[in-house]
Each structure stands twice: as structure tokens, then as C-alpha cells.
Image: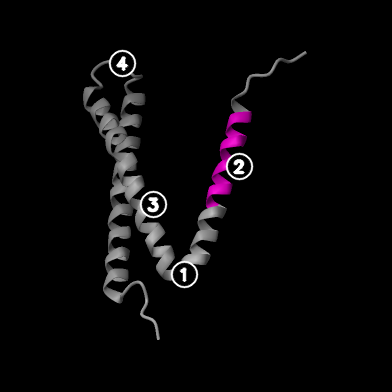
């Protein structure tokens, strides 16, 4: 009988880390939205330094949070669904993202009307 590649304590730790990263991501998004709304209320004029610093902070850390979330999600999927099914799920997500990007690129094209 083979032993699994993980144990219950690893699964528990990964789930806790996933919850933590979701909270961090949510707080960062809330901070960005609040800063943006505040700047809109000021018509993007006057003193917006506090808001701009929050936007800059979001830009500086969000990519690393997303990267950490992806790593944790990958490991959770491997444990919860098995490596083969997790690989299929990752491929499906990648295909959907590629389709979304192609659609977004098409909508950004400026066409000429006749």
C-alpha cells in the first residue's frame, strides 16, 4: 500500500493559507475600490495623495498575492482531486482564460465603419 503525497496536517494548513490569502486579496480589492471612489468623489482633483498611495500599494503587492493564491490552489487541487484531474482542471482554466483574452483583444480593435 502506497502512502499519499500529503497528510491531513498539510491539507489543513493549505486550507488555512487559502482562506488567509482570500482575505488579504479581498482587503486589497476593498482598499483599491475605496480609494478609487474617493478620488472620483473629488473629481480626481485636489489632494488625492492618500488615495494614490493606496492604489500604488495595491499595484505593488497584488501580483504576489495572486501568485501565492495560485500556488496554494494548485497544491489543494492536487490533493483534493488527484494530480491527473487537477492537471485537466488547470488546462480547462487556461483555455478559458485564453478565450477571454482573445475576446478582449477583438473588442479593443478599432474598426472602420463605412
Q: Label 4, label 1: how many angstroms apart (C-alpha)?
A: 53 Å
On the image, numbered disc 4 is attached to which residue? 45
Q: Nearer the viewer, mark 3 or mark 4?
A: 3
| Residue 99, label in figure | 2
The quarter of the displayed image where residue 14 is located: bottom left
Taking the magenta stretch, the answer to whether it contains residue 97 is yes
Q: Residue furthest right?
A: 114
Q: Is residue 59 left or right of residue 103?
A: left
- Vertically, is 2 above or below 93? below
Q: Label 3, label 4: how many angstroms apart (C-alpha)?
A: 37 Å
Image quadrant holding the C terminus, namely top right
Could you tell which of marks 3 and 2 lies nearer the N-terminus?
3
The percent position of residue 29, horizontal first and vertical second, equals 34, 41
On the image, numbered disc 1 is attached to which residue? 82
The majority secondary structure of the magenta stretch comes to helix
Label 3: which secondary element: helix
Q: Is residue 35 left or right of residue 107?
A: left
Q: Label 2, label 1: how many angstroms apart (C-alpha)?
A: 26 Å
Q: What's drawn in magenta, residue-wise? A: 93-106
Give the colour scheme of this rendering.
one colour
The percent position of residue 43, horizontal first and vertical second, equals 36, 19
Q: Residue at x 33, y 72 (%)?
A: 6
Q: Is 17 in front, or is 114?
A: 17
The mark total stands at 4
Could you tell which of marks 2 and 1 lies nearer the N-terminus?
1
| Residue 70, label in figure | 3
Q: Is residue 106 left or right of residue 60?
A: right
Amino acid at each position: 500500500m502506497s502512502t499519499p503525497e500529503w497528510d491531513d496536517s498539510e491539507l489543513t494548513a493549505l486550507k488555512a493559507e487559502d482562506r488567509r490569502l482570500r482575505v488579504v486579496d479581498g482587503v486589497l480589492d476593498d482598499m483599491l475600490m475605496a480609494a478609487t471612489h474617493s478620488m472620483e468623489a473629488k473629481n480626481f482633483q485636489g489632494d488625492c495623495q492618500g488615495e494614490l498611495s493606496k492604489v500604488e500599494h495595491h499595484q505593488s503587492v497584488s501580483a504576489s498575492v495572486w501568485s501565492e493564491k495560485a500556488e496554494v490552489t494548485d497544491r489543494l487541487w492536487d490533493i483534493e482531486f488527484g494530480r491527473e484531474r487537477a492537471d485537466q482542471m488547470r488546462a480547462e482554466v487556461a483555455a478559458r482564460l485564453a478565450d477571454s483574452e482573445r475576446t478582449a483583444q477583438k473588442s479593443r480593435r478599432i474598426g472602420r465603419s463605412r
